[in-house]
Image: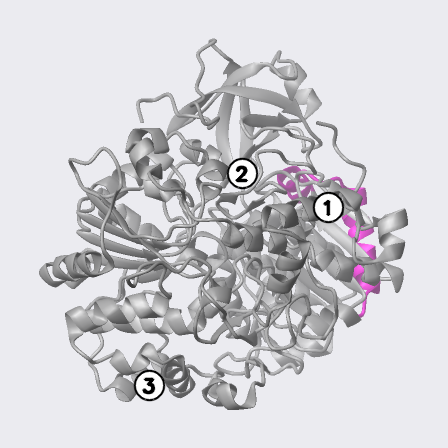
Amino acid sequence: MRRPRAGGGWKAIAYSFGKARQAGGLLRLYRALRSKNTCKTCALGMGGQAGGMRNELGRFPEVCKKSIQAMAADMQGRIRDRFFDDFSLEQLAGFSSRELEASGRLVEPVVAGPLDGHYRSIGWDEALDHIAAKLGKTKPDDTFFYFSGRSSNEAGFLYQLFARMYGTNNVNNCSYYCHQPSGVALTSVTGSGTATVTLEDLDQCDMVFLIGANPGSNHPRLMRTLVELRRRGGKIVVINPLREIGLERFKVPSDARSLLFGSRIADVYVQPHIGGDIALLAALAKAIVERDACDEPFLRDHTDGWDAFRSFIDGLSWSELLERSGVPRETIDRVADLYAASGKTIFCWAMGITHHRHGVANVQMIANLALTRGMCGRPHRGLLPLRGHSNVQGMGSMGVAPKLKPVVAERLAKTFDIKLPKGDGLDTLGSIQRAHEGGIRSALCVGGNLFGSNHDAAFASKAMSKIDLVVYLSTTLNTGHTRGRGRETIILPVLARDEDPQATTQESMFNYVRLSDGGEPRHELRHGGGPRSETAVIVDLAERLLGDKLSSLRDHREIRRAIAAVIPGYEKIGAIDDTRQEFQIAGRTFHEPRFATDNGRAKFHVVAVPEHDGLRDRQLHLMTVRSEGQFNTVVYEEHDVYRGQERRDVIMMHADDITRLGLVVNQAVTVRSDVGELSNILVRETAVRPGNAVMYYPEANAIIPSEADPQSGTPSFKRTLITVEAGNGRSSRTSAGSPRRTNGE
């Protein structure tokens, strides 16, 4: 497959028409996308009461391949009759993520016990009774409650409330495996764990840093904003070990000029070592200091820790920073000159920054660089983590976390007249580790794919297999249902956002809350069957365990009134059913240099500059990435158009490394790490910095060690030390085309 000359363009339009045919026709898909519901994919935000394909500034059309992929998946037909009879659990474990997703919508509860070779149907009442009975016999702290970021604020608030009334703080969500370092770091800097800017700020800034992010694939609607920034004379600096075509040149389908002629994106494309970001950012800060480009009045009046940070920067040698970052001095000087000339800079980043053993420190150093020039606490300047799931930030706001903020805990206890469990609960990684130790008896997972998102896939699979009962609330099948099963596993089918019979809300990465109207279920069955809403399932379980204590919360209006009383900044949600007014959350956007810290000042942090350990023999540093045809763990297409890859069982390397290792393109190799190996992986050439390699997530999770950032608990999916050796001829592919570990998993 040939790598394109630009991202987006006519191929993206043709792909969208193909998805429309799969979804039942262009008109049917268009009506679904235009309904008054929030987009189901990234947290950039689109839809709601302004109508689908429209953002909070009213711009139309706002849609991308990710939106279309997710909607088409929800619009597909039901899993065919006898599917689970025809495919055993062993066979399903060989299905790829794409094949499981494309099998159809789940419409009936299914169960697999310790002696079952297949999933089998089970009635709703029987399933719920069985789950409630198991929970009733289980010590609450031997259970964990996991939540995806694709759900609603209402379901998230209800879920964590149910878990705590049941008796545990083992409540967590998918952000602990993605942007938790952003939340921890930003809280330590500004007092708020979210973006400091609005969408309008992006439209008014004159410079953007894109660090460890690939919005051309993962946040495509952001590309139009970047194109317009360039048109008004703004500058874009991309920092990424891998050159991504969508960050070099992009054709925005909704912009005729860009579609026809293409748009240049990066003014400077910087390729550091994987893990060299702190050294690079420190070098940029040092260059700014040497240019006397610091905002001294801002630093004096609105920050703490500047003197210590300045001394730290002064004490770093240029030779050390250049060696550890892998970036030449002339490139650093060029970026520093652009930054010194900017009056309004916004820093954006994603999991290329957070998926490190020092993810929190990475984000703190980004904030340090921003504060050095006063690029925070003013309009059109600030910090913007590019979050993935459409409501992952809302999950944090709703208290879907192992530790509630004191004000939320106090209000929750008062509002519902309850005593909350004491002590901190387990985060996502802590829950998996406790399960591996045999300390978890029950697990409830709403949405997402907990197994698929874990590093060290064998460890995760073993951990899940030790749990007595694992319950999944899902719309479609995923690898968690096949390789992340407990001794007993129940899958409960749930409705998609635009099928919910009641309105729901979602929070964007810009702290903007949208109201989704919901809609009609696509797969109703007779006799009370078919998927149910997540809130209905939670209340059904709560009534079996707690009596009628949460029965009034079947009504989403009542949930929203409770949210208004409990969650700071969400006061307006209590009247949103009457006003239909979507809103910006108060106290999070900083357009004035008064921050949410104890003294109102932003905080600098001195962080260690990681060493760049040398490579020996056949070693490389590996990072995992998502493809253009993928959203988080969901793989919609096996091919990756933007990187020119027709399959996913590949390792992408620089040409110099292919030569150094005595390999050739398309040669089968075995890739090893400390926790396992993947065999029959094909060598492919790509424009990554020499010494580094790239493989696809989640397939490569099988060789990612169980290392995590100690401050956030987020696994490190970047900078894994691997060796690459010529293959031994053994096939490691299943009949479904998925790489398989060869260490006896």
In the picture of the structure, the residue carrying the numbered disc 2 is 624
Q: In this view, does 277 lie above or below 202?
A: above
The residue mark sitting in front, 1 or 3, is 1
Q: Could you tell me how far apart the alpha carbons at marks 1 and 3 are, in whole angstroms?
A: 48 Å
In the picture of the structure, the residue carrying the numbered disc 3 is 411
For residue 165, side relative to residue 653 (left or right): left
- 2 or 1: tag closer to the N-terminus: 1
Q: What residue type is labelled 3?
A: Arg
Q: What residue type is labelled 1?
A: Ala
- 3 or 2: tag closer to the N-terminus: 3
Q: Main secondary structure of the magenta part?
A: helix
Which residues make up the magenta segment?
319-344
Residue 415, image x and y in percent?
A: 29, 88
- Which residue is drawn at the image coordinates 65% and 13% (left, top)? 664
Q: What element does badge 1 sit on?
A: helix
Q: Looking at the rendering, in which quadrant would you find the N terminus? A: top right
In the picture of the structure, the residue carrying the numbered disc 1 is 12
Q: Considering depth in this image, is 37 or 378 the residue closer to the camera?
A: 37
Q: In this view, does 463 lie above or below 527?
A: above
